[in-house]
Amino acid sequence: MTAPFLKTAVSKGLTISQHSKNQFFSLMQKLNRGKNKKVVSSIKLYDAKTIEECPWPQTAEGDYAKSFILPLMTEGVPNYVGNIQTHLKVLIWGDLVLPITINENEYDNSYVCSPYSFYVSYAKKSLSQIAQPWAHPFIHGLLAGMSALFCRYQINRVVTVNNWLFSTNLYPHLTAEQIQTIAQFLQEKFPEHAIVFRSLDQYTNPLNYQALQQIGYHFIASREIFLINPQETTLFESRLFKSDLRLLNNSGYEIIDGNELSPEDIPRLLALYHDLYISKHSGLNPQFTLKFLKLVHEKKLMDFKVLKKEGKIDGVVGMIQCRGIMLCPFLGYDLEVPKEAALYRLLSTVLMLEAKKKQLLFHQSSGASMFKKIRKAIPCIEYTAVYYQKLPIPRRLPWWVLKKVCNSIGIFYMRRY
């Protein structure tokens, strides 16, 4: 069932209800410094050396987090995501579990741990998509200047909160008081680092967005994302969706559930993802390893669906869900299959059907913007929230420049391309 605040957001045209706003400000007014210090002392961080002492919450969320985080922490993140170097910790506060990544430089990291990779390296690779050749020299020069500035003043010295190492991080329900307390705790624990919350928007997590704004976080536009509300029945009654569904039904592909996959199928799934996201698109995308895929399949940390024909798997999607939202961080298809087979279109239809069946708000992430827009997906700008006010003035400069650029010319290009 869709979470109540999501129902409010969607039914009100994806705006925050007045009741939610009043709740938010009421919570903020109740905070006082003495009480907050006591709560902060109950928050604990655990790493590979102390993880055996970690009191994992005896909840579904706690079990999921333990199954996901513990292997990466004890065996090393690069064994599971090949292009990520980071110091992984886990924050425990009562029943709340949040993975925390700490970085210093690591400018070649996947963008999920590296602001530099996201805002400079990935942007350079995306220049070819801009259909205005006259703008290329200007943007290239701008990125070159930003690159020098960012490296000199350590933009990658960051602590990233709730970092599951996916392109999009889904958040648990956090109250304004929890946001305030966690932010204060991390600012005191890591005074030389910028504190970062990725994957924030005003629609899927409006209260988190508001809370971070209220305590002084700066919001930097990162990309345009797309949302599908399964309660909008007109989406599934449209001629275009019916055409997509007819194509899927006549494709000759079986839709196989992840439970029916054998261990021998897993390398094929990984190859499809790597061919699409790493070889075709960018090596800055998370480079999941076979060990990672075996983990999420065996522990049922992702729900898989595959397209199979004549004994051969040609497409795969891997889904996760959290508090009424569904996300697909793992997708791949055979690039050698003729384009007429429309494998991306078929996989997108599979995802739409899954969102409708489970009544989950479908977070479609970014990319393929025209494909999603003509299917009436709701576009919105996603942000990275950063607290850097207590850093030395030169260390603040990269974030100030990034905010100025991304929240103006950046948003223009995000919406256009």
Image (cartoon, rainbow, N blue to C red):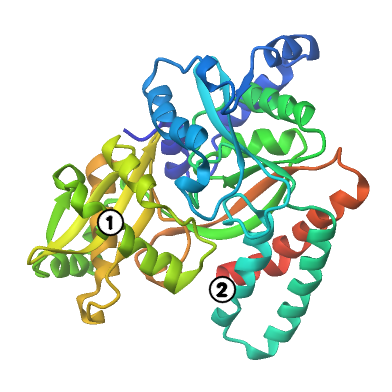
Q: Is residue 279 left or right of 76 when viewed as pictured?
A: left
Q: Is residue 254 left or right of 263 when viewed as pictured?
A: left
Q: In the picture shown, does residue 29 fall above or below 349? A: above
The quarter holding residue 350 reads: bottom left
The 10 Å Cα crowd at callout 2, few under 14, some 14 to 19, many 20 or more, is few
Mark carried by residue 416: 2
- Total labels: the figure holds 2
**Residue at the image point whose x is 80% and y is 52% from the top:** 154
**Residue at the image point whose x is 43% and y is 27% from the top:** 66
Q: In the picture shown, does residue 150 fall above or below 263? A: below
Give 322 or 359, whichever is nearer the viewer.
Answer: 322
**Residue at the image point whose x is 50% and y is 60% from the top:** 285
Give 248 or 113, whichever is nearer the viewer.
Answer: 113
**Residue at the image point whose x is 86% and y is 55% from the top:** 397
Residue 4's spot in the image, x, y percent?
Answer: 42, 30
Does any portion of residue 302 appear in the rendered image?
no
Mark carried by residue 267: 1
The N terminus - image quarter? top left
Q: Are marks 2 and 1 in contact (CB under 8 Å)?
A: no
Q: In the picture shown, does residue 342 fall above or below 87? A: below
Amino acid type shown at disc 1: Pro
Nearest to viewer (mark 2 / mark 1):
1
Residue 282's spot in the image, x, y percent?
Answer: 50, 68
Mark carried by residue 38: none
Dot 1 falls on a residue whose secondary structure is: helix
